[in-house]
Structures are given as C-alpha cells and as structure tokens.
Image (cartoon, grey):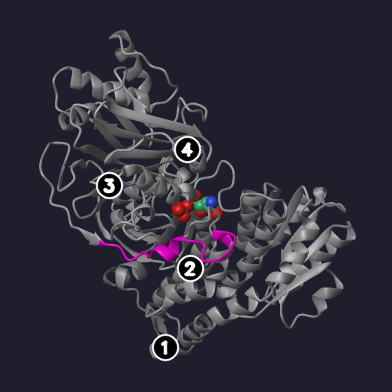
Amino acid sequence: MCGIVGYIGNKNCVPILIGGLKQLEYRGYDSAGIGVMNHNGVHVVKSVGKVAALETKINGSPFRSTLGIGHTRWATHGVPNERNAHPHVNNAGTLMVIHNGIIENYVEIKKTLSAEGFRFVTETDTEALVHLIDSFIRRGYPLFKAVRAALSQVKGTYGIAVVHASEPDCIVVAKNGSPLTIGIGDSENFIASDVSALVAHTKQIVYLEDGDIAEIRRDSFFVNDMTDQRIEKEVQYITVKLEEISKGGYPHFMLKEIMEQPESVYNAMRGRLLYDEGTSKLGGIDEYADRLADSKRIIISACGTSWHAGLVGEYMLEQYAETPAEVEYASEFRYRNPIITKDDTVLFISQSGETADTLAALKETKRKGALALGLCNVVGSSIARESTAGVYLHAGPEIGVASTKAFTAQLTALALITLMIARKKRLSLTDGQTIVRELQMIPDKIRTILRLNAQIETIANKFADARNFLYLGRGYNFPVALEGALKLKEISYIHAEGYPAAEMKHGPIALIDENMPAVFIALKDSTYEKILSNIQEVKARHGKIIAIANEDDEEIDNYVDYSIKIPRTIRMLNPILSAIPLQLLAYHIAVHKGLNVDQPRNLAKSVTVE
Ligand code: M6R
C-alpha cells in the first residue's frame, strides 16, 4: 500500500527519493509524488501511475534540494489522480505532508476547518490533517508541537512526514498503526515506511512505535511520545542485502521467489530441528513452549495466503498435537466478540507483519490475556514487535505481491511448531524423527518440482484463455486448492474457486462443461480413492482436468488431461510440495496473458488499512 520515503542531508535528495519510491513499488500504488524544500519554500511534483512517469516529469526540471519527502499512494479516499496524490500542501504552499493510513474523523475536522476559512481541494482524508497542522502553525506553534497538537485531535492510523518552510532543516514524522522507520547515515538521515527503501543507503535503523513523534535533522534526531516525553531508541542493524531485493536475472520477482523455495524452506527450518530428540526448538517461543503445549485451544488468525497456511496448520495441530485448533480471518475475528480465555494461544501469521486487520486482532487478543504469538517474515515488523513472542520465517524479502515463498515457509514453521507441541504430548520419538527426516528432505523434493517448470508452462499456455477455474482438494490439500485459486485470481484476473473436492456435488458441479478447467490435488494419501471418484465426476461432464499427482501414480493418467507429478512425503508436508506447481501454473498463465505479474492491479503487498 502507500509508501513513504524522506531524506535530509547534503546530497541532492531527488534521485534518493525516486530510488526509494522504486523500491516501494512492489507494495502496490496508483500514483506518486515528491516534495522538496528549497529557498523559495516547498515544491511538489506528482503524477498518476508509475514512479517512472514521475521521474520523466521531473527530469530536466531544476528540481533539487537536500531535503525532501516522497510518497506512493494506494487510493482509499478519492480516485487516483494528481490532485489526490501526496504530498498535500496547505493553502499558503508552505507546508507539505505525506501520509499512510486513514484519518477516520476527517469529515468533522474538514467541516470545522472549512468554517474557519481553510480551502480543501482534494477528496482525501489526509488534507484534513494538513490544514489541522497548519491551523496550529498559524497560532504560533513550532512545527513539532503543531504536529503533536494536530495528531492529538485525530482518530485513525497514520505514518506521516511533515515539512514546513519556516523550519527548512527538519522533517517531523509520527507513527500510529502504519509502519515508519528512520535510517541513520553520516551527516544525513532517511525515513521510510519499509526498510527496503533504505538498504541502498544505510543498515542502521530505528523502528518507530505507535505514539512516537520524531524530529529529524541532518546530524541528529529525537523521538518523543505524545505526552512529549523523550524516548531512547535502540538503533538496529538490518541484514537485508541489496541483491535480495533485486530480480537477480529473473524476469519477475515472483518467478525468482518461486525458484528460491528450496533455500527459503531450508532457512525456515535451519538450526531448528533436533533429530536425536525427534523434535524442534524454536528460540523465539522456547520460553512459552510449555504454555503453548498446555493451551486448551490454539486459534490461528491471518488474512489471505497466510490464512490458507493457517488452515493447513489446523490440520497439522489436530493430527499430531492433539490440540483443538480454529482458524479465523483476522478481519472477522477482531470485530466479533471472540471468546478468548487465558488458556488459549492465538497464533498470528503474516508475511509482512503489517496487515492492519491481523495487527488489530493481535492487540485485541493481548487485551483478553491469551498468549499471542506471531509468525512473521519481515523482521522488526509491527506484528513481530507486538507479539508476546514469535517465530521468524527467514524466507528472505518477498517482493512479488503474490505470496509464494512466504507461504511454504509458513507451512514449514507451522510443521515445526506442531512437532514441538506433539513431542511434549504423546508423539513417540520414532514418529518425531520421521517428521524431522521428512522435513530435511523437503528442499530437495522442491528442487525436483522446480525442474517441471517447462512442462507447467506448456500446460499453462493451453489454459491462458480460460475464463474460470476450479481447484479441488481434500484434507490437507483443500487449503492448497484455495491457495492455488487465489494465486491464479490475483495475478491472471481469471475467476477461480477453491473447494473441498467433496463439496463439488453440492453446487459447483453445475459449472462443469468442456470450458471449465478443474485442477485436482490428487496425492496418494487416505483421500486418494475418493478424489479419483471426484475426478471421474468432472470427466463425465467433459471438464478439462489438470492433476497434481505423485510421481509413482500411473493410474491417474487414465482419467486426467494433464498431470504434474511431484515426489511423495508425509501427509502433513504435502502442501509444501503441492502448492509449488500451482504457483508456477498461475505465474505462467499471467505471463502468457502479458500481465504485470509482480504488481497486479488493485493489490498491495502489505494491506495496512482495514
Ligand atoms: O502480509 P500478510 O501475510 O499479512 O498478508 C496477508 C494477505 O494480504 C496476503 O497473503 C495476500 O492475500 C497476498 N496477496 C496473497 O498472495
């Protein structure tokens, strides 16, 4: 979603801001803008569409400064056009603000300020904040105090950066619910909503917390809370490397990330498996391992792909850990009155660690006294920091909007958690060791699957014109069917539905005809015979069938049009393998259709608004 960058130092900020905005492109946006400070005041350039369009607009213009802020906007209030793009300026053209999040009481603020003579020119909620800050400046407040006073009247979420011509050597930033970091340099400082915009410049980062407000100058910065008390901040060193956030020779981030899965899955389990004891050890939650194992119930809460991983986790926990498990959409969980007790553990899964609904559900869980654990990929993200304890996925940065390697890393981490609990309960040493051994073999099995890329591309090309798809699976492979359908929808814009295969007879079978491809995840497990029957039912109605099957399954070829054969593993780990051909299928269909695979329309990488 929206992205923020900012610079104050001795270099020309324009290329730094443009470079930073380009690093944030993966988050999804529809317009962009930068604003700089020079001797005449603040100057803003905005454009609809890609950062490249903004760059073209700036190129050739005498637009330079040593202080500036930049923004990519994902429209919430008001259509994506230049007027609604950020930075927003006050009526005098002396103040500029960029903002991520939503000002919920903007209508009231706008009404009051309009009555006082402030002129509103955009449809955005942010503009209310600009004029509110300006109203305090007009009353003689210095910038920092004006921002704090304005924010104390605001309801909603924000990550903001504010610049005023009367204080040409500072940027004021504040955070509540939207991520914001300060990057520390040598006689220069940076701000960004996502560290990927900073890695080219510095590894020293200060993560702001909700309620923090900071003043940033070339050589210094300070952070206060909303009561104006100074907060000492720890400087953290980020390990993300520049090459990890570049395409590395692949045409798309999504393909690179799919291909990285042998390593990312290995990294998710690295150093965490104890073969001799037939268990796992997860440093981040070790202290809570007994409480987790003693939980009366484990609730998993997440959104999108992470929710699908949670569904697989539910099957794992029920099969091995003998713990009742439930999976909840974070957005529903937080707005119901969920019955959570101190005997429950709630596990929050989020690749980005910034998903607004998941974060809000986490906060609600903590209020109710249950153990709140996080399963995140992005180190230092809001959910990682808010959780009582947690497990990092170590999948490396995921830039493609469609989540791929984070999903398989989530499944791996869930398997490790399940194993740890199960061994504290009744799982035998030998059964524990079997799971450890099977986990250790997964990266090589993924390599085998990735060698099918060309075959999957050929199949994909045959189906690129389909208008609808059904994805069907049973047991552990039902969530994989949901995930396969989501991957296809989000990047190819083909309507796709995932169902438990047995549900087909209860409605979706009406859709089947010769134009309806059905993807079956038909692995040799206890559901195999049943799924073969479902395949027959589709075949009898002339549906086209693609099956994800096991390598040693020759029988299936009698019933399906195309089969993609993957290695065998134990049931709980099947989803890690079966998801991968579905990622490749979706990828190649989208590429064949000439679509923007990494930044599909309307989508954002981190959904930081509710
Ligand atoms: O960062 P999160 O895992 O919390 O994100 C949750 C969803 O927004 C995300 O999985 C989304 O569904 C992806 N685009 C799926 O590919």
Q: Of helix, strand and loop, which one carries label 2?
A: helix
Q: Earlier in the sequence, mark 4 or mark 2?
A: 4
Q: Earlier in the sequence, mark 2 or mark 3?
A: 3
Q: Earlier in the sequence, mark 1 or mark 3?
A: 3
Which mark lies nearer to you, 3 or 4?
A: 3
In three-dimensional space, the C-alpha distance between marks 1 and 3, rounded to whole angstroms, equals 54 Å
The residue range painted magenta reads 237-254
Above or below: residue 43 compared with residue 551: above
Badges 4 and 2: C-beta atoms under 8 Å apart? no
Q: Amino acid at mark 3?
A: Lys
Badges 2 and 3: C-beta atoms under 8 Å apart? no
| Residue hosting label 2 | 409
Q: Position of residue 491 (x, y in %)?
A: 63, 51
Q: Earlier in the sequence, mark 2 or mark 1?
A: 1
> Is 160 part of what is drawn in magenta?
no
Which mark lies nearer to you, 1 or 4?
A: 4
